[in-house]
Amino acid sequence: MFKKIAAIAGLTLALALPAFAATPVNINTADAATIAHALDGIGLTKAQAIVAFREEHGPFKNVDDLTQVKGIGQATLQRNHDAILLSGEGAKPSADAPAKPKHAKKAKAQATPTGD
């Protein structure tokens, strides 16, 4: 009976996790309170460290730069990857973004043979 209850509780929690997903936030412009509220696993102290690092070293150029902030590791980045914005409204540069499709090259006009 206990195993069934535990299984149901685990399933319920797994289905509820998307409800706790991080909220998109621009880490190059947001204040510490906004960052702490928006990202999963980032409290006010870590958010203040992010802002202090940004003020000292300039804006973050990619998401992995956050690992230079004490207390921020790969697991935190992976958990919040889709919510960490670097610039613009909802735009996030990503190394994983597919390359823009190349336009088809126009066929060169074939020279017509002259009947000499």
Image: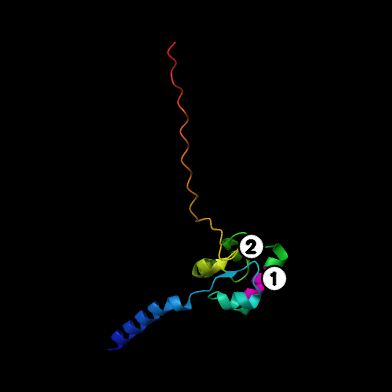
Prevailing secondary structure class for the magenta stretch in the rendered image? helix
Residue 62 relative to residue 2: left or right: right
Farthest bottom residue in view: 1
Can you name the residue that lies furthest to the right here?
56
What is the three-letter code of the residue carrying label 1?
Answer: Ala
What residue did someone put label 2 on?
60
Residue 20: give its label: none
Q: Mark 1 sits on what residue?
A: 52
Which quadrant of the figure has residue 31?
bottom right
Residue 71 highlighted magenta (yes or no): no
The kind of residue tagged 2 is Phe
Magenta part of the protein: which range? 46-53
Q: Secondary structure at mark 2?
A: loop
Position of residue 99 measured from the top left corner of the image (x, y, whole percent):
50, 50
Farthest left residue?
1
Task: Give the structural element (helix, strand or loop) at label 1.
Answer: helix
Front position in the image: 50 or 71:
50
Query: How many residues crowd around disc 2 within 10 Å: few (fewer than 14), some, or many (20 or more)?
Result: some
Q: CA distance from mark 2 to mark 1?
A: 12 Å
